[in-house]
Each structure stands twice: as structure tokens, then as C-alpha cells.
Image (cartoon, rainbow, N blue to C red):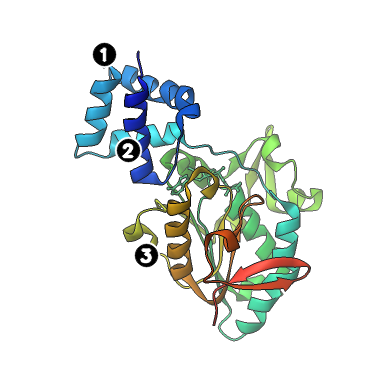
Amino acid sequence: MILSDELFDKFARLVYMRTGIYYDINKKYYVQKRVEKRAEALEMETLNEYYYMLKFSDDSSEFEKLVNDLTVNETYFFRDFPQLRNFAEDVLPVVVREKKNSKKIKVWSAACSTGEEPYTLSIILQEMLDRPEEWDIQIIASDINTEVLEFAKIGLYETRSVKDVPPEYLEKYFTKRNDKYLVNLNIRKPVVFKRINLVCEDETSAVNGCDFIFCRNCLIYFDDESRRNVISSLYEALNPGGFIFLGHSESVGRISSAFKVQRIGGAIVYSKPK
Ligand SMILES: C[S@@+](CC[C@H](N)C(=O)[O-])C[C@H]1O[C@@H](n2cnc3c(N)ncnc32)[C@H](O)[C@@H]1O
């Protein structure tokens, strides 16, 4: 099927407007493969026909399927270990001190993909909190991709996903099922999965009162304008004094000046001013 540059622009614009994901022309082949696959599944003759169906249909389910094919969902347990160590050993204790009476902690993994990130955070909280069973721990895990969320809910992973899990945690928090690893129930229990499109304010505003937000390796696919909009929604969802963590190659300071910047445990961290 033919995808002219002009039609590519139309698809790219539609996806950008609805998801924040930005494709320039050098991603034409990547996009073409995926729109072709969907158009063929619907037995359509041209990509133009598929485009108009996507744009004007009242039913969002086909757009959802295309987004499931377009998103990059690469992730694994304990991704960016130094950042997680800084969170666990240096930043978490700051919030734990403040919450010692209410004993409530709320974390949002805002682009959680197949679930490795929220389950990693759940393991860290189990390890770092003194008597974790006395705490009310809530971990909201969200993504735009409905397929990855279904996978995440099951909590069963291949060896490559758990390659960076410290061996003692693998032993303690996972059960081996043939050649796979099932996340134990006490780690899965605090995690609630939801479909949330980060560029949709109606959806992000449903999450609030967070002590920590992790939005790692998602905004790299966005342009500056969508990044700013998402960061401003995440800011709203944080408690005063709550912290935000982006991915290794992303910087909160480059996107927004609303956060308090401080050095904790040798790393620069960003929090919502009190
Ligand atoms: C590379 S994964 C990152 C997973 C994990 N946070 C990590 O760092 O390992 C990026 C995720 O962002 C999600 N994503 C992309 N656009 C999104 C949007 N508009 N709203 C919510 N999630 C989105 C994708 O579906 C994908 O699962």
C-alpha cells in the first residue's frame, strides 16, 4: 500500500494530537508498517480509507489498536539502578519521615508499560519501609497501551526482564514457573493498573495526592509542547513536597521551572514546592 509524504503527515498529526507522540518524516517506514498492518486486518484497499476511518469514527477502539502497535514498550525490572538507589536510600526517607503518622504512601508509575517499573517500586517499598505491613501503600500504574496493561496485570516475566533484579530479591519476591518468574502476591497487591493517556487532562486529573511520580522513558517520544503539558498535569497530581523522576536522558528542569531543585544523596532531584 502507498503512503505518500502528505498522507504520512496526516497520520502523524492525528497520532500527535491524540497521544503527544511525535513522528517526523524519518519515522515514515516505522509508521507505514503499522498502519498497513491495521488497514490489512480491516481488509481495506488503501491507507487513505484507513486514515479517514480513524479520524472520523466515533468508536475509539481502532485508534487504540493502532496505538498499541505504535508505542515502544521496552522496559525491565530495576531499570536505571543508580536512580532507583537514590530514590530508595536518599529520597524515600525524606517522605517517610513526613508520613510517619499517616503511614500512607502513594506512587504513580505514569508510563508503566508491561509492569516491571511499578513492581520494582513495590519491591523497593517492601525493602525500605520499616514494618511495611503497617503502611498503606498505593501504586497507580498507568499506560496508554491496553495490551501491555493486560500483560502487566498477570505479573509473569521472562528471564530477560528480571536480569537486573538482585538475586536475593529474585528469590524473595518471585516464584519460578517453568522458565518464567511470577511476581509474588504481596508485591502485586498494592499495584492498581489503569489506562491513562498522559496528554488527556480529564484522565490525568483522576490521579492526585501522589508522593512520588515516575514518568520514565515516555516523554522522549513527545515534542516540547506535549512534554510541557504532561509535566504540568503531573505537577498537579503531586502532593506538595512530592518528587518526580523522569528517565535517564530526560530533564525536568529543561521542561519546567515550577519544581524545587535540590541535591539529595548526590543526585539532583525535583519536588513540588511546599
Ligand atoms: C519505553 S516505555 C517506558 C516504560 C518504563 N517507564 C521504563 O522506563 O522502563 C514507554 C511507555 O510510554 C507509553 N506511552 C506513550 N505515550 C503515552 C501517553 N500519551 N500516555 C500514557 N502512556 C504513554 C507507551 O505505551 C510505553 O509503554
Q: What percent of the width, then of the height, locates residue 257?
A: 54, 69
Q: Are marks 1 and 2 in contact (CB under 8 Å)?
A: no
Q: Residue at x 77, y 70 (%)?
A: 265
Which numbered disc flags the more N-terminal residue, 1 or 3? Answer: 1
Residue holding disc 1 = 45
Q: What percent of the width, then of the height, locates residue 196?
A: 40, 53
In this rendering, the label closer to the viewer, 2 or 3: 2
Q: SS class of the residue under badge 2?
A: helix
On the question of residue 131 being in view, the answer is no
Which numbered disc flags the more N-terminal residue, 1 or 2? Answer: 2
Locate residue 40 relative to residue 182 in the image: left or right.
left
On the question of residue 68 being in view, the answer is yes
Residue holding disc 2 = 14
Locate residue 193 relative to residue 188 in the image: left or right.
left
Q: CA distance from mark 1 to mark 2?
A: 20 Å
Q: Are marks 1 and 3 in contact (CB under 8 Å)?
A: no
